[in-house]
Amino acid sequence: MSKDKKEEKKQTAPAADEIKEEVKTEEPEIEAKEADGKKPEAEKAEEKKPEEKKGKEKKEEKKPDLKAEMDTLNDKYLRICAEYDNFRKRSQKEKDSLYGDVKAETLKKFLPVYDNLVRALAQSTEDEAYRRGVEMIMNQFNVTMEKLGVTEIECLGKKFDPAFHNAVMHVEDEEKGENEIVEVFQKGFMMGDKVIRFAMVKVAN
């Protein structure tokens, strides 16, 4: 019996040695697999770095484009502001001009009334109350015209100026200067720098 047991032990011993060798051979395989599993992660990290660099480069490339776009928009904004300012000034100028033209045309309609008052005062009359009444109307008319910015064009003794005077008669007079106005047939008026009615005059020499 003892011999049989010894033989069994001898047979089992090599089996244990074989298991140990198998375990040893499996361990390098596991380590190799783990190493293989780690390598792709390292490679991925290295691959990500160039991609991150490219992303940064793209962002840096976009910055000049944004600045150029901002400059373009700012230029457009300034142009629109300038155009609007010019439009506003032009509109205001046209409005003022239109108002002045309408005002001048309206005042021009009242000038025949003024002419009739002048003729009435030029007539001799014994009725002092009548004359005083006409003078009061004339004074009120003149005050109103002044408030509206209307002024009389100076004529007598002045040199003829076609921009303000309308010569309807010419006379030779050695005592008068050249192109001197010697008589006024109809008074002229201005509103600011605009002539409402030219003065009708007689010019000497």
Image: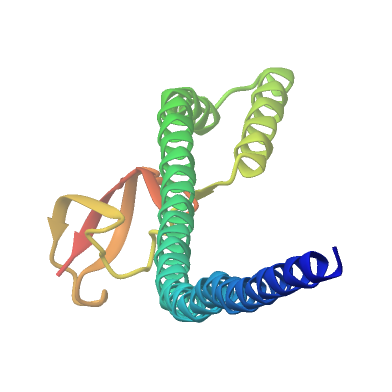
Picture quadrant of residue 71: bottom left
Work out whether residue 145 or residue 87 is closer to the camera in this orientation and state it: 87
Residue 67 visible in the picture: yes
Query: What is the x, y in percent for residue 86?
Result: 42, 55
Picture quadrant of residue 94: top left
Query: What is the x, y in percent for residue 93?
Result: 44, 48
Work out whether residue 99 or residue 65 is closer to the camera in this orientation and state it: 65
Is residue 108 placed above or below 143 in the rendered structure?
above
Residue shown at the point (63%, 78%) measured from the top left = 21
Asked whether, in this view, residue 14 is left or right of residue 52, the answer is: right
Work out whether residue 142 or residue 25 is closer to the camera in this orientation and state it: 25
Residue shown at the point (42%, 30%) measured from the top left = 108
Residue 193 visible in the picture: no
Query: What is the x, y in percent for residue 42?
Result: 55, 79
Query: What is the x, y in percent for residue 180?
Result: 27, 69
User: Where the C terminus falls, by quadrant?
Assistant: bottom left
Work out whether residue 51 or residue 188 is closer to the camera in this orientation and state it: 51
Say how the picture is coloured: rainbow
Is residue 14 placed above or below 103 in the rendered structure?
below
Residue shown at the point (71%, 23%) measured from the top left = 128
Asked whether, in this view, residue 8 is left or right of residue 103, the answer is: right
User: Where the N terminus falls, by quadrant?
Assistant: bottom right
Asked whether, in this view, residue 30 is left or right of residue 69, the answer is: right
Circle count: 0
Residue shown at the point (68%, 39%) measured from the top left = 143
Asked whether, in this view, residue 165 is left or right of residue 107, the answer is: left
